[in-house]
Amino acid sequence: MDSSNKRGSVVRVSTSSRAYDVHVVPGILDDCGALVRQSAGGQKAMVVSDTNVAPLYARRVMDSLEKAGYETAKFVFAAGEASKRAGTWASCLEAIASAGLTRDDVVVALGGGVTGDLAGFAAASYMRGCSVAQVPTSLLAMVDSSVGGKTAIDLEAGKNLAGAFWQPSVVIADPTCLSTISHELLTDSCGEVIKHGVLADPKLFSQLEARPINDPEYDVDELAAVIARNVEIKRDVVDADERERGLRQTLNLGHTIGHAVEAASNFTLGHGTCVSIGLAAIARAAASLGICSDQTAQRIERVIDAHGLYTDVDLPHDQIVRLAMSDKKRHGDGVNVVLPLEVGKVEVRRVSMAEFARLVDAGCGTASLGRTAHLAR
Ligand code: GLY
């Protein structure tokens, strides 16, 4: 960790296009104006948020921005993945233009993953790029989507198909915001935390085994430490490979099958929930091929189950393969899958469609424990 004290940490991200700080500090929301001023400058700040988060936090954030000398405006959209579309993005750009922002001004993305992706893409495209400050309020956004500069909207043809790599000037994560999210949403986010443990950190994984991160008894300082560790894991990957040419593909652990499950559920299952299903399935497939041990696959299933997430899915295998092959991560007639070798170590392997189908057969419908999501019609 770059700097830390009992009340939180600052993790420095240094990608090839931009360096910035990720502040993970309980109560820091009220200081966000000063942090945005230091990192982005400008005169005007457009706060972008959804109908769930804006009533809770927009006023506090705008007060802090105004105290730091900004003229503020707000764009609020209907909460939910259905808003991550071209229409909302265009309305957001119109609102930014009407508020008179220039390229020197700043968009403040206040909310979860949808808000960060949408506002980030609006900032990336407004006047060919203005600053964005990411202020994540969900666990998933704090540990994953606010860091690393992926911004996007969904198209009819699929999720995240239009977007840009656009790094923020600062990320401001206040773990006290997690007190206002539902246990269900917190649980969904745990999928990405478990993924980070499997791909890079046996110690974090053991900590999750000993005590699930969605345990209501976690206090905010303990949560801040876990979030900061997840940010460091992601930082180490995106610093080395901002544009997903190599190492960043490891962050897709659990996502190839997970995205297929997410699409098959019509996005009624959360992203982290689907990543957990994909992670458990690919771990079982890897064990069946001798790529990892049975014990590793079982540890992964057990920790997913302990967090209250599904370990398997009931879906026709040909549907999973078809949906996975229509995902944007496909390469030619194959796909790069991330396979666990042991807890803390993974490998990216290019497989043909036929090899992927064999992995799906070995990994789906074969759980040794936990709950199955029933999606077959
Ligand atoms: N969530 C995966 C990535 O940022 O690359």
Image: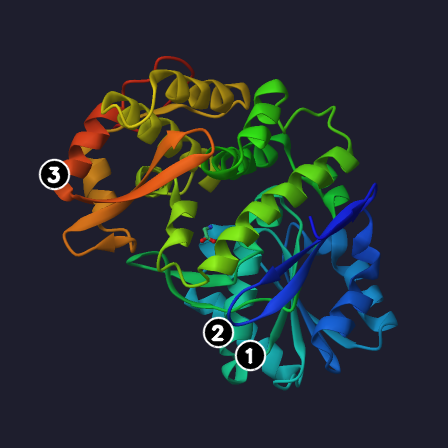
Identity of the residue drawn at 44% across and 59% down: 241
Q: Is residue 171 visible?
A: no
Vertical position of residue 283 compared to residue 136: above or below: above
Identity of the residue drawn at 35% across and 24% down: 312
Identity of the residue drawn at 28% across and 28% down: 291
Identify which residue, 201 or 29, lies in the foreground. Answer: 201
- Other-residue count near label 2 (Cα within 10 Å), few / some / many at <14 / 14–19 / ≥20: few
CA gap, disc 3 to disc 2?
A: 40 Å
Q: Is residue 225 visible?
A: yes
Residue 30 at x, y = what percent? 83, 57
Display coloring: rainbow
In the rendered image, which residue does mark 3 sit on? 354
In the rendered image, which residue does mark 2 sit on? 90
Identify which residue, 261 or 210, lies in the foreground. Answer: 210
Identify which residue, 132 or 81, lies in the foreground. Answer: 132
**Displayed quadrant of residue 284:** top left
Residue type (three-letter) at the residue carrying disc 1: Glu
Q: Identify the residue at the far right of this view.
A: 67
Identify which residue, 276 or 97, lies in the foreground. Answer: 276
Vertical position of residue 258 compared to residue 27: above or below: above
Residue type (three-letter) at the residue carrying disc 2: Ala
- Other-residue count near label 1 (Cα within 10 Å), few / some / many at <14 / 14–19 / ≥20: some
Residue 315 vs residue 308: left or right? Answer: left
In the rendered image, which residue does mark 1 sit on? 94
